[in-house]
Image: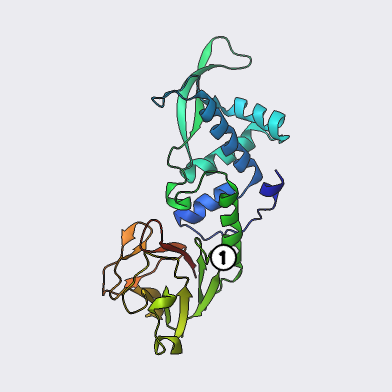
């Protein structure tokens, strides 16, 4: 519980990006606890064919577990608001099941909730759900957002040897991003972000992997000739074409082991 309490509110109200929506949903002690309850229930009640040994939990059962296991006492109405936030963030699913409910005779149709199988697939890559590594991402996000203003693009490296390094790029600057081996003395006269050589699948051609700059009131990237491609999320950027960068995006310089993952906000 102490680790979760260290996560503070760091999401701006204007964020509409799915990544920010998911971070905002989890960045709350009650909702974090609800996700743990659903995770533990599914871990202990799933058959090999992904069917349930027992009916999924409905709101009263979740409320009871919040009180008994987490010492969290909230009204059913407030619980409903937290569940709506998790549904909006696409982290849980709502099902209709028949349950015995207090002060009612016979089973009634009620709304039950399950954790989505791919809830964190696009957000936390291959990191185990609710691990210490996951919690560290909140710290990286917090640092990134703390530096955010209307004049800079803030880049934070989310993986590998350079994980945690953060850079502020001014609108008047052009930045080159690539492995140290790919920079020559002329490149170093510009603003550069030299990545450690352990990012082995980041382009090994004789120039930096990527350019980032501000043009026509937009932050843009240009991959001129990288060997393993650049991705915004899972969408590959066209080589040689200036591509607009969306706020709260994950840049991936190649994919898989040896790639560099960089979170961008502005």
35 sits left or right of 73 in the view: left
Image coordinates for residue 17, horizontal then vertical, percent? 45, 57
Q: Along the line of sight, which residue is nearer the eye, 161 or 75?
A: 161
Question: In the figure, 30 relative to 136: above or below?
Answer: above
Crowd class of label 1 (few under 14; some 14 to 19; many from 20; radius 10 Å)? many
129 sits left or right of 73 in the view: left
Residue 60: quadrant of the picture: top right
Residue assigned mark 1: 164
Q: What residue do we see at 49% from left, 67% from top? A: 265
Question: In the figure, 86 relative to 190: above or below?
Answer: above
Q: What residue do we see at 57% from left, 9% from top? A: 105
Residue 217 makes an appearance in the image = no
Q: Along the line of sight, which residue is nearer the eye, 103 or 206?
A: 206
Image coordinates for residue 24, horizontal then vertical, percent? 56, 52
Q: Along the line of sight, which residue is nearer the eye, 108 or 123?
A: 123
Residue that protrudes farthest toward the top in the picture = 105
């Amino acid at each position: 519980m102490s680790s979760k309490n260290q996560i503070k509110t760091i999401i701006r109200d204007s964020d509409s990006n799915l990544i920010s929506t998911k971070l905002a949903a989890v960045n709350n002690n009650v909702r974090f606890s609800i996700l743990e309850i659903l995770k533990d229930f599914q871990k202990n009640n799933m058959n090999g064919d992904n069917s349930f040994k027992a009916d999924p939990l409905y709101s009263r059962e979740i409320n009871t577990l919040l009180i008994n296991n987490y010492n969290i006492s909230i009204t059913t109405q407030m619980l409903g608001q937290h569940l709506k936030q998790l549904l909006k963030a696409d982290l849980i699913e709502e099902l209709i099941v028949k349950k015995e409910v207090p002060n009612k005779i016979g089973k009634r149709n009620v709304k039950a909730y399950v954790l989505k199988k791919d809830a964190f697939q696009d957000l936390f890559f291959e990191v185990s759900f609710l691990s210490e590594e996951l919690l560290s991402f909140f710290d990286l996000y917090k640092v990134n957002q703390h530096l955010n203003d209307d004049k800079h693009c803030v880049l934070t490296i989310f993986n590998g040897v350079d994980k945690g390094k953060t850079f502020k790029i001014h609108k008047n600057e052009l930045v080159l991003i690539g492995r140290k081996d790919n920079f020559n003395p002329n490149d170093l006269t510009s603003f550069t972000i030299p990545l450690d050589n352990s990012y082995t699948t980041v382009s090994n051609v004789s120039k930096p992997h990527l350019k980032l700059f501000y043009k026509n009131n937009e932050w843009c990237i240009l991959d001129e000739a990288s060997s393993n491609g650049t991705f915004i999320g899972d969408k590959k950027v066209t080589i040689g074409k200036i591509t607009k960068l969306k706020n709260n995006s994950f840049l991936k310089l190649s994919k898989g082991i040896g790639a560099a993952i960089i979170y961008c906000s502005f």
